[in-house]
Structures are given as C-alpha cells and as structure tokens.
Amino acid sequence: MFRATVRADRLRFVEEPRTAVRFPGTGKRTSASRSERTNVPGEVVAGEEYRDALIVYRLATRLTGQPEDGRDAEDGAGA
C-alpha cells in the first residue's frame, strides 16, 4: 500500500490538475485508490484558494494471477 499526506495552510492550483494512475507490465491485478479531503473539493477550480487543506491519498494493488513462466513466485526472479 502507498499512502501520501499533504497539508497546506493555503493551496492554489494554477491549472486544473490532470491525474492518472497506471500499472505498466503484465499480469492480472486488483487495484483500489481513494482520497480523503478536508477543505479541498473532489474537483478543484484553477485559481481558487483553499485554506487549511488536508489530503490523504491511498493506493493499493496486488497481482491476482499466476507468476509468468520462468519466474519464481517468491521473489519474481528468473529461473
């Protein structure tokens, strides 16, 4: 799991942020992400100032399939 926390007295975006989460590589996986926000809306407005902002972001992913041929299930190293 990955977790990031951002706190700011004042927060302003010059542009509306463009975000994306990608998992390159092969293998089936299950992923989930979420953010908890205080004083910051789900969609921010460029130029607007947000005060006493708090954002906690969590991301989790796990492989759900079998290891690829020639890879060890324990450490992912090749045979």
Image (cartoon, rainbow, N blue to C red):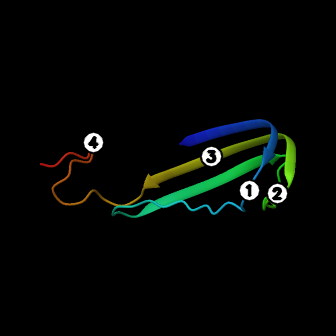
Q: Earlier in the sequence, mark 2 or mark 3?
A: 2
CA gap, disc 4 to disc 3?
A: 25 Å
Marks 3 and 1 sit apart, C-alpha to C-alpha, by 24 Å
Mark sitting on residue 74: 4
Task: Give coordinates of residue 71: x percent, y percent.
Answer: 20, 52
Choose the circle earlier in sequence order: 4 or 2: 2
Labels 3 and 1: the sequence-earlier one: 1
Disc 1 marks which residue?
14
Front disc: 3 or 1: 1
Q: Look at label 3 and name its amino acid.
A: Arg
Residue at 86 percent of width and 47 percent of height: 50
- Percent from the top left, x then y, of residue 29? 44, 60
Q: Nearer the viewer, mark 4 or mark 1?
A: 1
Label 2 sits on residue? 47
Crowding near the residue tagged with mark 1, few <14, some 14–19, many ≥20 C-alpha atoms within 10 Å? few
Q: Check disc 4: other Cα within 10 Å, few if <14, some if 14-19, many if 20+.
A: few
Residue 56, horizontal then vertical, whole percent: 70, 42
Give x and y (percent) for residue 20.
Answer: 57, 62
